[in-house]
Image (cartoon, grey):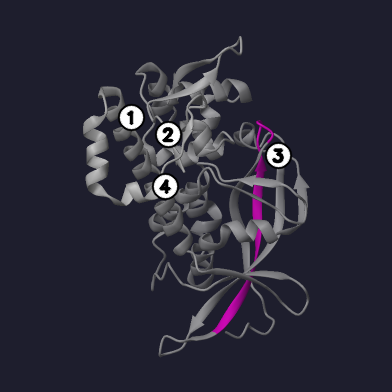
Amino acid sequence: MILVIDYDTISEKSETGKGYCAMKIYEKIFARLEELHMSQTELSRRTGIATSTISDWRKKQINPQADKLAAICKALDMSLVDLLCDEGSPVQVTSTDYFIDEDHMLELFRKSDVEGKRGIIRYLELLEICKEINETSHTKKQRRNISVIQDVDGNNIVVINDIRFKGKRSIHWKEVRAYLKEYIGDFYKVASTGDVIYIGSDLPSEYSGSVYTKKLNGAVAKAKANAAQGLPEMIEISTGRFFRENNEEKHNWNAKNGWYRYNSYFALPVYDDNENIERYNVFHASLLIRHASDGKMYLYDIIDIKKETSTPLEP
């Protein structure tokens, strides 16, 4: 089954319901912002895209870059199909055999009129866009070798099976910050409370450069750096929500509704002289969550990291 998609335009029902009017992708984005009563600043915070770039889409009447589409869709709670597809276009069905015959494809292209050729080119471009987005997502998941287990006391532990940040003398926090930027725009649900925790554009800098982080050294610094790989699962398994009011004026805008802390556990491998995993050290951490003026909860930092004194996990 072949879905005909026009990357340049999408369709929206007219107010009368009697047909469709063509809309550019950037127009669809701004229409969705109005529908959600969401500001450009909020979209920027959720996606990591500069507000000036978002404004340019409307001012210059241009569409976002392909690699930004997935983050935009997630922030606006819409699918890629919703953003790119022409709702008024029919779904065309054809034999898949045609599409493994290059000569037949070229013949169809030559016989098509200008609009037809333009549509074929746009469709192929969209396939490349979707392929790029899927490959990026797949690669990101592959880079995280994570599992979740339970200890004898029933505590969930996020097991991080690879040491990505291995600084012998000190951690290269710039690398950690760059890695964390991949999470911007994502959100995860705490299983024990149902709270949805967002990853805002402020997390990478705070996580890698907070006052708490700057005081860390040795094994705890290495633990925090590598815990970045397990953030999604650490949020999902967290428990023991604790609330306190915001008393700092500088956080009136990003933590207007106060702060929350959650307990979470993660484990990191310890290697022997032959680079084989000898055991896993377990750490406790507090997830620091800010409750912003937009009503959403954002991961702000991970603090109070302490190695558990109980028996380490066996590999």
Q: Position of residue 278 (x, y in %)?
A: 52, 87
Q: Earlier in the sequence, mark 4 or mark 3?
A: 4
Tell me the kind of residue under disc 4.
Answer: Ile
Residue at point 45%, 18% (across, down): 22
Type of amino acid under label 2: Val
Label 4 crowd bin: few (<14), some (14–19), many (20+), radius 10 Å? some
Q: Which of the 4 image quarters holds residue 240?
A: bottom right
- Is 292 colored magenta in this rendering? yes
Q: Is residue 259 above or below residue 150?
A: above
Mark 2 vs mark 3, foreground winner is 2
Which element is circle 1 on?
helix
How far apart are the two marked residues, 4 and 3, measured between alpha carbons? 39 Å
Task: Identify the amino acid type marked 1.
Answer: Gly
> Does the residue at mark 4 contact the one at mark 1 (Cβ under 8 Å)?
no
Tell whether label 2 touches label 1 (CB within 8 Å): yes
Residue annotated with mark 2: 4
- Mark nearer the N terminus (4 vs 1): 1
Identify the residue under disc 3. Answer: 246
Look at the image and give the residue range highlighted in magenta. 279-295
Q: Is residue 32 magenta?
A: no
The spot of residue 129 in percent (x, y) is 37, 42
Going from N to C along the chain, the mark reached first, 2 or 3, is 2
Front of the two marks 1 and 3: 1
Between 137 and 175, the one nearer to me in the picture: 137
* Real-space Cα separation, disc 2 to disc 3, in angstroms: 51 Å
Q: Nearer the viewer, residue 84 or 149?
A: 84
Q: CA distance from mark 4 to mark 1?
A: 21 Å
The residue labelled by disc 1 is 119
Tell which circle, 1 or 3, labels the residue nearer the N-terminal end.
1
Check disc 3 and give the amino acid type: Asn
Q: Tell me which label, 1 or 2, sits earlier in the chain.
A: 2
Please name the predominant secondary structure of the magenta segment in the image: strand
